[in-house]
Amino acid sequence: MQERLWQIDELNFESNHQHHYETLFSIGNGYLGTRGTFEEGYFLDAPATLIHGIYDHAPGALVPELVNAPNWLDLKITVDSTPLQMIMTVDRSDFMTPPSGVVIGYERSIDMKRGVLRRDVLFRAQSGNIVRITFERFASLHDQHVMAQRIVITAVDGHPAIIVESALQTDVTNNGVRHWLPDPITKTEGGRLSAQVTTQQSGYVVAMASYLNSPHTEIALPHPGRPATHIVFTLKQEESVTIEKLTTIYTSRDTADPLATAETALDAASARGYDTLLSDHIAEWATDWETADIRIDGDEAIQRALRFTTYHVLIASPRTDEHVSVGAKTLSGLGYKGHVFWDTEIFVTPTLMLIQPKMARNLLMYRYHNLHGAREKAKANGYEGAMYPWESTDTGEETTPQWSDVQPDGSRIRIWTGDNEQHISSDIAYTTHKYWRWTGDDDFLIKYGAEMMLDTAVFWGSRVEYNADHDRYELSQQIGPDEYHENIDNSVFVNRMAQAHLKSALDVLAWLKTKDSVAADRLIAALDLNTTRLDKWRDIVAKMFIPFDHEKAIHIQFPGFFDMEYIPVPHYQPRTTSVQAILGHARSIQTQVIKQADVVMMMALLGHELSIPEGFDPLQVMLNNWNTYYPRTDHGSSLSPAMHAWVAARLGLLDEAYDMLDHAVHIDLQDNKGNVRDGMHAAACGGVWQAVIFGLCGLRISRDGALITDPRLPAHWRRVSFNVYYRGEKRAFTVENPVYSDQS
C-alpha cells in the first residue's frame, strides 16, 4: 500500500490555520490526547493534553469540563543566541541577513499507520548559520503512560552553538479558566524533571516525570511552575546530534501515588530506550489497522481521509478503562468541554464493536457504571427507572448547561437539550442490543447490558402519555436529532426509537429467563418488573403513535412540521455557515429547515423496521422520506452527512451517497464546519466508517445469523476490502463493483 495514502501533510506553515492543524495533528493512545502544537510554542497557540476522566468544576463556571493537563511537549531551541520560532519568509534578502532568525523550509506530517507526528524545519539564525531540525513524537500505544519525543539537529551551514531546554509547563488553563491549585510539586535533578498538580474542585491529581537523553551534560533550571533542564553544545558543519525526551504520566485515577509511579515508570521507559518504545508502539498500530483499515480501490482521496477519521477514533477511545467515554470533540480540543453525548453510542461505539469489540465494551460499561446518575435524573424529573443525561462527565450526572454563552446582542439562549432530548436513553439501549448481536457477548448482557436496557425501558414506561381519545401512547415536549425544533410533541424518531426500545427490552428479558433464570429473577426483583408493568410495555409497543401521512406515504417528522415556513435549503449555496445562522435562531425554529438527519437517521438505524402501515411498500416509503427531508436538511451538524451517505447508498442513490460521504469524510480535514480548532468531530469520524461498511458495502446480519453484504459502490470504485469481528471471529470481506466484474 502506498505510504502517501497513510499521511496527512502540511507543506507550508500559515499562522491563521495553526489551530486547525493543531487539532488534525493530535496524537493519542486512548488514555490521553495531545494537540499538535509546536514544542517551542507559538503566538496564540492552544496547547492541550487531555486525559480521560480528569474533570473539574471551576468556581463560577456553569458546568464541569475536561481539564487541560501540564504541557509535556515543552522544548525550546536556541541557535547562536537566536530562539527557534516559526517566522517564515518569502523575502530572499532575509535568507542572507535574517533580522531575528527565519524559517526558510518547513514540512509537517502525521503518519497514521505508525501513529507518529514529524516536523522538519530549516532554520537560519541571525548569525547566518543554518540548521535542520527534525521533531518526532508519539503517545505510546504499547504503554499508555509513556510519551516520547526525538529531536535531530544538523548543522547545514556553519558551526552553530546550540542550547536545548526541556521543561514541564504546569501553568496551563482552559482558555483562561484555571483548574489547578497553585503551588504544584516540582523537582529537577540533572536531566530528570517531575511535576504534580491537583484540580481545585474534583481533587484529581496528575503527575508527570520527564527525562532528557542526550550526549551532553544537563543543567537543571528549578522553577516553581516550570521545572526545566538544558544542554549546551556546538556542532561542526554537517554534524548531527540526536536528543530524546521521554515523559510518563499518571493520575490519581490510576494509582494512589501518581508522582512516585510516574518516576518509577520513567526509569523503566528510559532503560528500554526510544527505539524500542517506538518499535513496540508501531507493532501495536499494525495490529489495530489489521481490522480497522478499509481498503478502497479507485479513490485515493476518500482512502486517505477515511484512514484519518479512523485514526482519530482509535486514539480517542479508551482501551483499558471502562469508567470513561469519548467526548464529542474526542481528546483533541476543549470543544463541548469534553462532555459525552449520544455521539458515542450511535457513531463511535458501533464502529468499534466491529473493529475493537473490547473498546466498544468499555464505552458501554461507562454507561453501566453511571446508571446511578441516570436514575437520579429520572427521579428528579418525576419518572421511574433510568433517564440518561444528554451530556455527562465522570459523575454520570446531567451536565448540560441551561443557558448559552452570551450572544452578540447580549442575550442568552435557553438550552433545552438537557431537559428534553431524551432519546439518548433509547440510543444507549439500541447500541447495547446491537453490541450483543454483533459480538455474542452473553456475559456482558447478563451482568450489565440487560439492566441498562430494562431500567431505561422502565423510564419510558413511566414517561409515555396515554391518549384515551385515540387509544394510543404519545410523547410530548421532546427534542429529536433535529435540534432546530425544540420541545415538540410526537417526534417520529423519538416515538419509534422508544417503541423499539421497549420491544427489545421485552425480548432480552425473555431471553434472559431461558439463559440465566437467576439473573432474570434478580433484575425482575430489583427493577420491579411486575406483570402489570410488562403488560403496559406490550401495550405501548402495540399502540405507540408513529406519525405517518397515508396520502403522501411518508413519516411525518412531527405533527405540524409541514405547517411551518418552507425554506428551499438547496438554494442557499454556496455558503460557509448554516442556514440557521443565516436566518437567525428565532426564525429558523419556525421553518421546515432541519438541522441534521432525523427521519433519515431513523431509516439508517432501523432499516426496513420503520413501523410502516400495512399495505405500503417499505422501499417506496423510504424513498418518499428521502425525497421529502433531504432537500430540507441544513447539515448544521457534522454527524448528518455520514447518515445521509449510508441511507442514500441503501436506496441506490449512488451520486447522492458519494457526495454525502465526500462531505462527511472531509469535515475535519477541510474544516467544513469552521470549528475544528475546538477539536475533532467524533460523530463524523465514527459515522463515515459505518457509512462505508453498512451503507455502501451493505454489511448486515441476515435473519439466520449469517453476515452478508449487498454493495452499492460509486461508479469509480472497483472494490472495497475490510475485516470485522463477528461473535469473536475475524471475518474478511471484499466487495466488488458489478460494473468492473461484468467487464472482466
Image: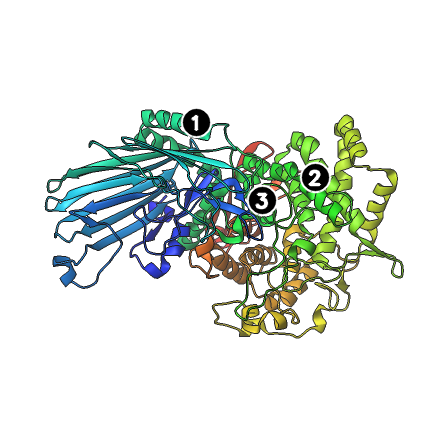
Amino acid at circle 3? Thr
Q: Which secondary structure, mark 1?
A: helix
- Upstream in the sequence, badge 1 or badge 2? 1
Quarter of image, res 286: top left
Q: Position of residue 59 (x, y in %)?
A: 54, 49
What residue does disc 2 label?
A: 452
Single out the mark in the foreground, 1 or 2: 1
In the image, residue 38 above or below residue 582: above
Residue linked to disc 3:
393
Q: Which residue corresponds to the image point at 42% horizontal and 27% vertical from the top-left?
A: 260
Q: Pick whichever of labels 1 and 3 is earlier in the sequence.
A: 1
In depth, the one of 678 and 173 nearer the eye is 173
Q: CA distance from mark 3 to mark 2?
A: 18 Å
Q: Position of residue 723 (x, y in %)?
A: 51, 39
Numbered disc 3: secondary structure:
loop
Give the residue type at disc 1.
Thr
Q: Local crowd at mark 3 within 10 Å, few (<14), some, or many (≥20)?
A: many
Front of the two marks 3 and 2: 3
Residue at 72 percent of width and 36 percent of height: 451
Q: Is residue 616 left or right of residue 701?
A: right
- Disc 1 + disc 3, Cβ < 8 Å: no
Quarter of the image holding residue 666? bottom left
Q: Kindly tell me whether residue 502 is visible in this rendering.
A: no
Q: Position of residue 79 (x, y in %)?
A: 18, 46
Q: Is 89 placed left or right of 292 in the picture? A: left
The residue closer to the viewer here, 437 or 92, is 92
Checking the image for residue 261, the label placed there is 1
Marks 1 and 2, how far apart at CA: 36 Å
> What type is the residue that disc 2 sits on?
Met
